[in-house]
Every structure is written in C-alpha cells, then in structure tokens.
Amino acid sequence: MKKIIAILFSIFIICFSILFIVEPKKDFSENENRKLASFPKFQISSIIDGEYMENLGKYINDHFPYRDLFVSMKNKFEIEILNKKLVNNIFIAEDGYLIENYENGKNTDKIIKNLNLFRESVNVDVDFMLVPTQISIYSDKLPKYASYGKQVESIKEYYSRLEFNNIDVFKALFENKDKKLFFKYDHHWTMDGAYIAYLEYCKDKGIEPVDLSEYSVEDVKGFKGTIYSKLNYPSNLEGEDLRIYKKDFNLEIEYDGKKSNSLYNMDYASKKDKYSIFLNNINSFVEIENKDFKGLEELVVIKDSYANSIIPFLVNHYKKIYVFDPRSYKKPISEFINEKKIENVLILYNANTIDNDTGINAIY
Amino acid sequence: MVFSSLEFLFFFLPLVSILYFLIRDLKIRNFILIVSSVLFYAFGEPKAILIMLMSIVLNYGLALLIEKVSKFKKVFLFLAVVINIGLLFIYKYADFFIGSVNYVFKSNFSLLGLPLPIGISFFTFQAMSYVIDVYRKDVKAQKKILNILLYISFFPQLIAGPIVKYHDIEKQIDNRKTSFDGYCKGVHRFLIGLFKKVLIANNVGLVWENILNSDISSMSLTTAWIGAICYSLQIYFDFSAYSDMAIGLGKMFGFDFLENFNYPYISKSIREFWRRWHISLSTWFKEYLYIPLGGNRISEKRTYVNLFIVFLATGLWHGASWNFIIWGLWHGFFSIIERLGLEKILKKDKTTILSRVYTLFVVVVGFTIFAITDFNKLREYIGVMILNKNHLILDKEAIFIFINNYFYILVGIVCSMPIYLKIKSFNKTYLKIIGFIMMIVCFIISIAYLVSSSYNPFLYFRF
C-alpha cells in the first residue's frame, strides 16, 4: 500500500508541476477581483533581501492549477461535511444568506476624533448616517449560538460621541426587513435598502421624498458578490438579482474628470462585480449636476460604496452633488466645502467598513 | 521555505528528488543535497546563510584542532562553546538581555535589533554536538568539510529539528542505502506529517488565535479552556508534524533520523512527558548539559540544582522571553516535586486517571504560559481558566466555537493517542484499504487547504 501511495503522490506532484509550467497564466482573477502576482523580475538586490523568493512564492500560489476549484472544495468540505457555520469569517446563515461577521472596531476612538475635527473645520451642520449591515438586520437568520461583535452598540457609540446631526436608519431598516434590503452574497445593501434610508434622510431634512413608483425597474441576473467570492461556494450557484431603479434625469456627470450622463455604468452588468454598476464603481471624486432641478441647493457626500446606490434618489433634491471617496481623494474635503460654501454635507458609511477607512483621517 | 507550502511540494521537492535519483554516485548525491539545502535556507533567509556557513566552517576547524593538538583540546573546546553560544546570544538573546537590564536598572542601552536567523537554535546545537563528540573521542574529527556541511545544513532538519547528533548520523553520510522501499516509507511518513500540519495544527491554531484576540474580559471559562487545549494541540501537531516530515524526507534520501515525539499527551507524569516530548532536545540537554554537570551522581541536592539548570536552559532555548523561562521552570518545578515523592503517590492510582489528568493540567497550563508573551494578558487569561467570579463558566460563544470546530479538536485529541499503532497491529486487509483511501482523501483535502490559504479575495470595492 505504501508503495502505491508513494507512486501516486509522485505522479500527482509531477503532473501538477508540469501543468503549472505549461498552463497559460491569467493576469486578473475575477473571482477575487484582484490582479494576480506576476513573475518576479530577476534582481540581485531583491534576491539578497528575500523579496524575490517571497514574490516567487506568491506567483506560484496565485497561478496554481485549478486554484478556484481547490478553494471551493475546501469550503464545501468545511460546510457540508464538517457542518461548519462560520467559514472564512462568513456565517452560513439561513435562506442561503452568507453574512459577513462583525468584529468590534479597533479604531473607533481615532475615527471619532478625526470626524469631530472635521466638524470643527466646516461651518455647516453635517448629517451622519452609519448603516448597520446584514448581521444586525438579519440576525435572526444567523446560525444557532452564533456570537459576533456588537455592531448596534458600536453605531450608538458613534452617534453619541460625534457632534453631527445623526440619521439613525437601524429602526427603519429593521422594521422593513421583510423586503430584500441586503444582498445574500454581497456585503452591500440593495437599492430597496438604500431607498428606506433615503426616506429617513428626507424625513430628517424635511424634504418630500420621491415615490419609488416614479422609477422604472430593471433586474440584472446572476449577481454573485463579494461574500460569495470569499467562499467560492456553492460552486453551481446561479446568483441573485440585482435590482436597479431608474428614472429619467437630465444629468451631467464627471467621474474623476470623465464625462457621462448616467448614474449607472451598465458595462458592469455582464461582469462579476455587478454592484459597480452604481456610480461607475470607485471614483475619488464625482460631480453630478441635475439640469432639470430648479433650486440652487448643493450637497457634498463623503462616503463608502454603500452610498453609490442611494445617490440615484438624492439626485432629485439637489442642483449639484459632489461625491468624495476619502480612500482615494487625498485633499482635505473641508476646504472644498468652505470654498464652495456648501450647506449640505452627508457622511455615509456602513458599520463594517468605517473602522478600516484610513482616508477619514485626512478629510479635514 | 516550509514543507507545507506549494513551492516546496510542487517544485523544490520533485526537482531535488529527480536529480538525486538520476545520479548513482553517493558523493555527487551528497553534493546535490548540500546545494539544495543551501538554496532551501536561502529561500527564506538569504542574508543569514553567511552566519550558518561561518558557524559550520568554525566548528569544522575547531574539531580538527581538538583532535590534532590534543594538548590544547580544552582550550579549543572552550572556544567552540563560546563561539556557538555567543552566536546564539547575539542573535537570539542580546535584545532580551539588554531590555531586561534596562528595565531593572532603568538604564537606556539601545537594542541591537538583529533579525533572528531561522533555525539558529537548531544548527548551533547540532554543531556543538559534533565538536563535543570529537572532544570526547566518541567520533573522529571529519576531514571532509562537505560532510560537516551536509550534517548541519541538511534541509529536512535544518530549520525545525529534530536536532540530529553527529554520532547518530556520522556513518550514514558516507555510507547509506537509498532504496525504492525507503523512498516509499519516507513519502508515507512525510504525508502523515503534512496532514497533521495542514488539517489539524493550522485549524486548531486558527481557533486559538481567534480566542486569544477576542475580548478576554468577557470570556467564559470554557472558551478559555478550549483556547488553551487548541493551542496545546497546535503546538504538538505543528512541531511533531515537522519532525514527521523531516524524518520522512530523510528516509526518502536514505537517512535514518531518531524519533522526536512519542505520544507525549498520554504521559502519566511530567518526567514521562519529557521522555516523549521533543526527544532530540531533551536527550541533547541530558548528554551535553545534565550529565556533564554531574547528573544525579553527586548528591541529592546537586541533582535538583542540575534539574533546575536544565529546565531553565530548556525554557530559554525556546525563545528569548520571560514566559519561556517561566514555562521551563514550571516544568522543572513539577519534575522535582515528582522526584521528591509525588510520583510514588501518583503510582498508587491504578486507574491512572488521576496521574493523566494531573499531567495534562500541568502541560496545558504550561503551554498557555508558553503562548502568551504579554504578562498582563497572561495573568488575565490564566485567571479566566481557574474560575474567576466575574466570568461565566459556559456561554454562547464557547458553544459556537466548539460546534464550529469540534472536528479538528476531536481528531486532534484522538490522534494524540497511539490509536494508529493499535490499528496497525491488527494487520487486517480491510483496515489497510480504509487507510489507503483515507490517505488519498486527506492528501486532496490538504492540497485544497494549502491552496486556499493563499486565496485572499482582495475586496478593494468592499468599502
């Protein structure tokens, strides 16, 4: 028996090394949404400090034959055979939901300090919306005994320590949780979720909200989002619908200087990363002008990607919206607000990612 | 490079093996092993390779001098010990020493900040074993530097043991048989180690890491114990897996290394534990420290002093930090108490339950001390383990951690017992077939785990 095993082992190893060498290499992994490591350049200095070998290791890992298959096999083994309910920090929840775990924030004090400094550096009231994620709204779908970080308490802490006008959307989202407010396989909220938050925003600002019936509906099929990417399981998943609400506006938009007249980039509908339809994925600065709008009100939005799907509703109420992504926009946003004398500022984040946004440290 | 990596398994190992088996001449084979060992070390530590080579050359030279100029052999031995310990001290302990001095005397000496060369504790101990063996005339000084080079740098045991002693391996370097049968046995042993590392050690390790990084102030007693048990399983399976892989690789190339672990967790006393745990280290200390100090032959009092010294050295060998020293002395304390009479009392319990519970308790608490370098954290964690009023005994978190990871923990516990040997002794064909199928399944799953560990969806769009 030992001989057969040794022979099989040797054959397997040699086959895979040959396969690795002859197989064509990809530059980009759609599943992981990242560039794969390229073959390291031969340099004496990088060999001496060990960087070359490290990169070689990364290259071998990234281009290993049948990589995606092995990953889904491992997760399938853990979920189906070991019956694990938390895999790669994702809860395997009821109704097919994959819910990202929430870990208590580590940078809360620092972020609150910086946001308050930002508040001092501008002369206007700032609206602040910290959106809870699946784990708080759909906690009833989590596996039995699941223990996770205290997201709702963390949101409350932000609200109580910040000198902002807080717009708490937890209650509204929780009461409407029967509608599909979040994706099953992606960490974002759906446009329905964003609409509920929009209603709360309008209530707070004393604006008359636009009814959803004024929008037309378009469903993009087969959306397998970021959370699915982390597990690559189940491998035959068809994905879910990504619902887009559209309305005819007369818009003039600049995405980091690139002109457009749509809030949606439908090129992404055929790609894996479909949430990027909203507001053309990631841009450090987006300027949106609503030409039909009669008033002069302008709005600055400082945000993460959750805001991308609420902008199509906010557009109804402002002549101009300036959207900043502090992760890539490196100039102080407070200066922009003061120079342009903007009177409406909205900071919108989801509670899972605010802790990791180092860009917030430079917004004032 | 580590054995449980794709680059080792799919590139380094097949390349070295093919070259090795294509060539028949033992001298060239040894040369291939030396070159590949140097490359293996350089893959992770390109700069430290010079330190290792320097150490080898010095020890080689001093051993020759000890034999040739026997008048001054004590001087040369002294020099060799000073050089080896000195090297170890500068790279491993100097900063710890300076930090402790600064702390005690409120002084302000700056730290050296030297990076620790991988495996330095292992290769300096091997080098010392060689020089001392020559001094004791147990072996002849080796004139061929390549033999010493291979003895110390041979990649299977280079960075994490077992600590091979020169007198155990001397003859195999120049005279060994490499056979297909040995190759197969070696592969089998290597795979067992791979499974232990990838399927058990890494996974219980993750459980431990998550527990340690969670909030200790709200932790329940059960969670703390699950964590401590998982760490104890991790360190055993990680370390013994490495030895299994090393022994297996050695076999593939015709070497026979001594066993390094012998089911330590079934021990009935701490003294037995040390006969089963990291055997190559404890025998090293026995042969080259305990016995030269006089062992147990001088007086009873001296025996305890010697034991104290050996356990202090054992703790310190594991790392430059106070918690390793405390861990060593913790074991030393129980060893001495056992000699003083506890062992006799334990032996009265015919069921052996009491002695096993006692031993595992000392070992698991010991490894908790070993694992946590931060003193305040360690005090807090141990506090939770020994029932603190402010902590629950059992909570939701503990239940969830257990039901989510029971498989790894139970398999770990079962595999800590010599059940495999028992099954093997039945010698039944159907058991062999089941074993065969399990080997294949475990191999595929291990590769899946290895590939997955590098799979990190980069979620730049997650914000």
Image (tube, coloured by chain):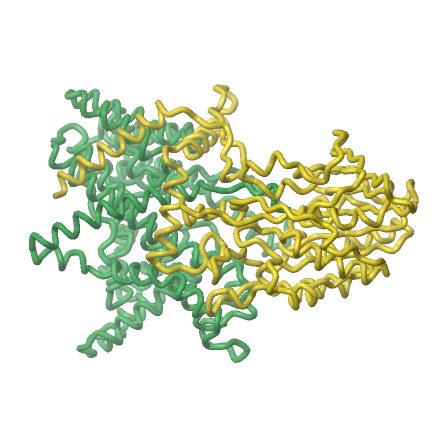
Chain colours: A yellow, B green
Residue nearer the viewer, A313 or B310 = A313
In the rendered structure, the answer to whether residue B114 lies left or right of residue B187 reads right
Question: Residue B12: x and y, percent?
Answer: 32, 29
Residue B305 in view, yes or no: no
Kindly indicate the quadrant of the structure image that contains residue A17: top left
Residue nearer the viewer, A77 or B407 = A77
Residue A355 in view, yes or no: yes
* Residue pictured at 35% horizontal, 52% vertical: A77
Residue nearer the viewer, B438 or A234 = A234
In the rendered structure, the answer to whether residue B400 lies left or right of residue B437 reads right
Question: Residue B28: x and y, percent?
Answer: 21, 20
Question: Residue B316: x and y, percent?
Answer: 41, 52
In which quadrant of the rendered image does the N terminus of chain B lie?
top left
* Residue pictured at 86% horizontal, 51% vertical: A344
* Residue pictured at 22% horizontal, 45% vertical: B440
* Residue pictured at 39% horizontal, 36% vertical: B83
In the rendered structure, the answer to whether residue A186 lies left or right of residue B259 reads right
Question: Residue A184: x and y, percent?
Answer: 53, 54
User: In this rendering, is residue B108 above or below B123?
Assistant: below
User: In this rendering, is residue B278 above or below B178?
Assistant: below
User: In this rendering, is residue B273 above or below B107?
Assistant: below
